[in-house]
């Protein structure tokens, strides 16, 4: 799991080769994004990674953001300072429909 669910001091850094080799420190993750949306009155739009992400990763992300009961991911959200779940109306699967790692080029069209 990356910086989406961890406090900034616990995030790892990695180089984004697809973005010109810049360093990504994950200091602005899901909690920061959701808090920003709340502060400015914007509806969050969450996009899941279908290129190199997994179904499990997306499921955990949804659970972390929206589950109000007892679960490992809801508990992680609470541990990061957010007791109540967020409301997310807009979800998307995949945002870049180019390259070898994206479903548009690799999936069976019959699916």
Image: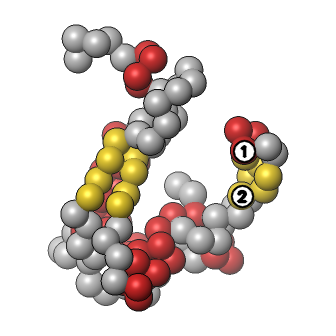
Q: Residue at x 57, y 57 (%)?
A: 2
Image point (77%, 48%), residue name: 15
Depicted 39 relative to depicted 85: above or below: below
Q: Viewed as shown, does residue 86 lie left or right of 5?
A: left
> Can I make out residue 51 in this image?
yes
Q: Residues within 10 Å of mark 2 (few under 14, many from 20)?
A: some
Q: Residue 20: x, y in percent?
A: 79, 43
Height in image: 25 above or below 104?
below
Question: Callout 2: helix, strand or loop?
Answer: strand
Q: Position of residue 51 (x, y in %)?
A: 48, 33
Secondary-structure class at tag 1: helix
Q: Which residue is mark 2?
A: 24
Query: In the image, is 51 to the left or to the right of 84?
Result: right
Q: Vertical placement of 97 versus 76: above or below?
A: above
Question: Which image quarter: residue 56?
Answer: top left
Q: Which mark is residue 19?
A: 1
Total marks shown come to: 2
Residue depicted at x 34% and y 83%:
41
- In the image, which is nearer the foreground, mark 2 or mark 1? 1
The residue closer to the viewer here, 33 or 4, is 33
Q: Earlier in the sequence, mark 2 or mark 1?
A: 1
- Disc 2 versus disc 1: distance between alpha carbons? 10 Å
Spot occupied by residue 76 in the image (x, y as percentages of width and height):
40, 73
Quick one: quadrant of the C terminus? top left
The chosen color scheme is secondary structure
Specify whether residue 70 is in view: no
Q: Are marks 2 and 1 in contact (CB under 8 Å)?
A: yes
Report the disc number at residue 87: none
Residue 86: where, in percent of width, then height? Answer: 28, 76
Q: Is residue 13 above or below residue 35?
A: above
């Amino acid at each position: 799991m990356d910086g989406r669910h961890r406090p900034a001091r616990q995030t790892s850094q990695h180089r984004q080769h697809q973005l010109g080799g810049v360093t990504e420190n994950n200091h602005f993750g899901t909690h920061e994004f959701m808090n920003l949306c709340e502060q400015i009155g914007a509806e969050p739009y969450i996009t899941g990674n279908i290129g190199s992400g997994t179904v499990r990763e997306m499921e955990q992300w949804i659970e972390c953001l929206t589950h109000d009961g007892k679960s490992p991911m809801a508990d992680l959200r609470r541990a990061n300072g957010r007791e109540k779940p967020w409301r997310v109306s807009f979800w998307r699967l995949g945002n870049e429909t180019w390259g070898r790692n994206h479903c548009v080029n690799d999936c069976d069209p019959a699916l």
